[in-house]
């Protein structure tokens, strides 16, 4: 390769014809590239660059997500919101429910201990852990 390079260096450099040079330079001149000025144009340029390889696949994925979102929003249950806004039951209603509970217990033949007579248990206490000794 060294000999070849030396032979090339010894050869005289020929000038290109002027009309060829103008044609080559005109073909090599890049088309004016629009540089995004604001953030929205920059975002659009980045999105086009990202989605261009497979636009149909990205559009299908976006449509699927839109359908999922619409189904999710339409299926939400508004009941928890209503339950939070409802007032606490009145003492009369609580007495009526207690009376119904006693009548039901009489019908099925069991005894029900009234809430005020029921022994209330506190929170469970932590268990003590046994120490296990390992002998080697």
Image: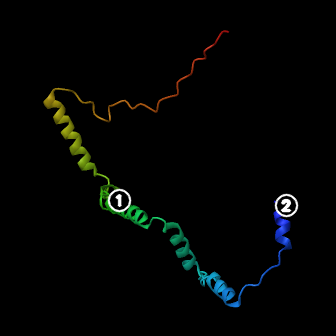
Which type of secondary structure does the marked residue at label 2 adopt?
helix
- Residue 32, image x and y in percent? 60, 85
Q: Residue furthest top?
A: 135
Is 20 situated above or below 11? below
- Badge 2 local density, few (<14 within 10 Å), some, or many (20+)? few
Given residues 35 and 21, the one toward you in this image is 21
| Residue of label 2 | 2
The residue at the point 54 percent across, 70 percent down is 49
- Residue 96, image x and y in percent? 21, 45
Residue 94 circle label: none
Q: Is residue 21 left or right of residue 40?
A: right
The answer to the question of whether label 2 and label 1 lie on touching residues, with beta carbons closer than 8 A, is no
* Quarter in which the N terminus is drawn: bottom right
The image quarter containing residue 66 is bottom left
Given residues 75 and 71, the one toward you in this image is 71
Q: Separation of disc 2 and disc 1 at Cα?
A: 68 Å
Is 95 situated above or below 75? above
The residue at the point 85 percent across, 61 percent down is 2
* Quarter in which the C terminus is drawn: top right
| Residue of label 1 | 68
- Badge 1 local density, few (<14 within 10 Å), some, or many (20+)? few
The image quarter containing residue 15 is bottom right
The residue at the point 73 percent across, 84 percent down is 16
Is 45 situated above or below 135? below
The residue at the point 13 percent across, 31 percent down is 107
- Residue 82, image x and y in percent? 31, 58
- Which marked residue is nearer to the observer: mark 2 or mark 1? 2
- Residue 31, image x and y in percent? 59, 83
Given residues 61 and 127, the one toward you in this image is 61
Which type of secondary structure does the marked residue at label 1 adopt?
helix
The image quarter containing residue 132 is top right
């Amino acid at each position: 390769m060294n000999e070849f390079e030396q032979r090339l260096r010894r050869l005289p450099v020929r000038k290109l014809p002027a009309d060829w040079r103008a044609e080559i330079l005109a073909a090599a001149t890049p088309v004016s590239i629009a540089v995004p000025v604001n953030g929205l144009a920059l975002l659009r340029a980045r999105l086009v660059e990202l989605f261009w390889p497979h636009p149909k696949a990205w559009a299908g994925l976006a449509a699927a997500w839109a359908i999922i979102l619409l189904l999710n929003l339409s299926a939400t249950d508004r009941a928890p919101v209503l339950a939070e806004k409802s007032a606490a039951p009145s003492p009369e209603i609580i007495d009526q429910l207690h009376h119904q509970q006693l009548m039901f217990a009489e019908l099925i033949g069991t005894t029900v201990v009234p809430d005020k007579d029921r022994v209330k248990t506190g929170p469970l206490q932590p268990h003590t852990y046994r120490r296990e000794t390992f002998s080697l």
